[in-house]
């Protein structure tokens, strides 16, 4: 599965990088060298030029500080253009422009189950009638709720006909706000003729800017830069889907504390089965004898255990190994007389031998075990 992380980096060739967008920007203004900036707006050298420049910022989160917003507005008011496409735009900028953006629901934003053919389009003045800009992914759901007709104009719509791109006139310049950076991803722009979507948007800006800048700072933001006025609760409340999820989680937690804790049965500890310590002890002793290669001792104990087994199970009297004894044992145990005789011969040989090698020990053990199985 491809990596679907949204980076919008000019060097990233993955589906949601912006390598293609950067190349389209370069080709749209062939007489300009595209300057890449990696500093916040308030510290950017791009704002040293006072007019007729273009600044492009494509990012998932645009979270500037107050001083960055002030620098942006001063830059635009001098006659420059600022193009911003972001999924999350900080209210510091939106409030200045009297803009409000509706976010999609959480499931609609991340669930593969919601994938569908989704599209964007521009206003009729910028869009050729036969152009179609669509791809298969999560719907383009973000759109503007609040429109300022006196200082802004509509530029584009999503597939549902809701406004997703606006231009705001500020001083002598323009601010383009776009709510769907995925429309400038490699995946979207390389689908059919979708590259024409970005080219047509760029045609609405200064035709021959003195300088063109590409932002490489905000597309690396994972958290808000400003800490002085940051409030976790207030930030959650800024975004309706996040606020809904927060209150729902809090409500479910209250239900759990009120009802779930009382009804849950106490966990019954598992009782471990009683271990046969005598077997464990015997196995330990046997391993000790095997390690020391004391085959004679092992054989004597095997024989003693076997004789005890015969005495307690078959209640035979007489001399073990005698002809009468072996005949009686064969009848009671169901083991053939031949095997019984062979077993007692092996027992007699082991008892009389001073040393027993591994082969003799294994042979004796196999015959005894064979007798037990009957």
Image (spheres, rainbow, N blue to C red):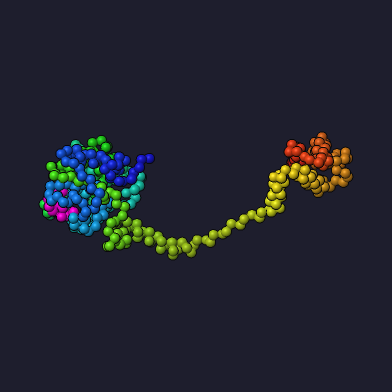
Q: Residue at x 20, y 44 (%)?
A: 35
For residue 119, side relative to residue 210 (left or right): right
Q: Is residue 240 magenta?
A: no
Quadrant where the C terminus is found in the figure: top right
Q: Nearer the viewer, residue 340 or 213?
A: 213
Of 110 and 291, nearer the camera is 291
In the rendered image, the quadrant that contains the N terminus is top left
Q: Residue at x 30, y 42 (%)?
A: 12
Q: Is residue 324 above or below residue 65?
A: above
Return the x and y of residue 348 as percentages of the image width and height.
Answer: 83, 40
Query: What residue lies at 17% left-to-right and 43% top-to-bottom?
Result: 202
Range of residues picked out in magenta = 72-81
The percent position of residue 70, horizontal first and vertical second, equals 18, 57
Residue 265 shows in the view: yes
Above or below 247: residue 279: above
Left/right of residue 70 with respect to residue 224 in the rendered view: left
**Residue 269's quadrant in the figure?**
bottom right
Number of marks in the rendered image: 0
80 is within the stretch colored magenta:
yes
User: Is 150 or 76 nearer to us in this picture?
Assistant: 76
């Amino acid at each position: 599965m491809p990596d679907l992380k949204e980076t919008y980096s000019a060097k990233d060739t993955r589906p949601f990088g912006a390598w293609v967008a950067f190349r389209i920007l370069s080709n749209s203004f062939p007489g300009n060298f595209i300057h890449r900036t990696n500093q916040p707006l308030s510290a950017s050298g791009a704002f040293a030029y006072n007019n007729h420049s273009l600044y492009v910022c494509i990012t998932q989160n645009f979270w500037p500080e107050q001083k960055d917003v002030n620098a942006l507005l001063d830059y635009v008011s001098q006659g420059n253009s600022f193009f911003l496409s972001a999924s999350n735009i900080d209210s510091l900028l939106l409030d200045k422009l009297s803009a409000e953006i509706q976010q999609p629901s959480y499931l609609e934003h991340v669930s593969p189950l919601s994938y569908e053919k989704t599209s964007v389009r521009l206003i009729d003045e910028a869009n050729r009638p036969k152009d179609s800009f669509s791809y298969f992914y999560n719907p383009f759901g973000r759109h503007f709720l609040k429109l300022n007709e006196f200082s802004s104009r509509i530029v584009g719509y999503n597939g549902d006909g809701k406004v997703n791109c606006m231009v705001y006139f500020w001083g002598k310049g323009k601010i383009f706000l776009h709510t769907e950076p995925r429309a400038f991803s490699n995946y979207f722009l390389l689908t059919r003729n979708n590259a024409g979507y970005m080219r047509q948007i760029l045609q609405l800006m200064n035709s021959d800017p003195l300088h063109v800048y590409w932002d490489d700072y905000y597309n690396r933001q994972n958290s808000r830069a400003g800490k002085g006025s940051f409030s976790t609760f207030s930030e959650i409340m800024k975004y309706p889907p996040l606020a809904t999820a927060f209150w729902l989680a809090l409500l479910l937690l209250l239900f759990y504390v009120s009802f779930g804790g009382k009804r849950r049965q106490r966990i019954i500890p598992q009782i471990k089965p009683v271990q046969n310590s005598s077997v464990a002890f015997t196995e330990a002793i046997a391993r000790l004898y095997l390690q020391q290669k004391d085959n004679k001792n092992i054989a004597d104990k095997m024989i003693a255990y076997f004789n005890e087994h015969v005495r307690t199970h078959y209640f035979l009297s007489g001399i073990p190994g005698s002809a009468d004894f072996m005949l009686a044992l064969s009848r009671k145990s169901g083991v053939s007389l031949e095997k019984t005789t062979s077993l007692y011969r092996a027992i007699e040989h082991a008892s009389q031998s001073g040393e027993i090698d591994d082969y003799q020990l294994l042979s004796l053990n196999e015959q005894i075990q064979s007798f037990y199985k009957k």
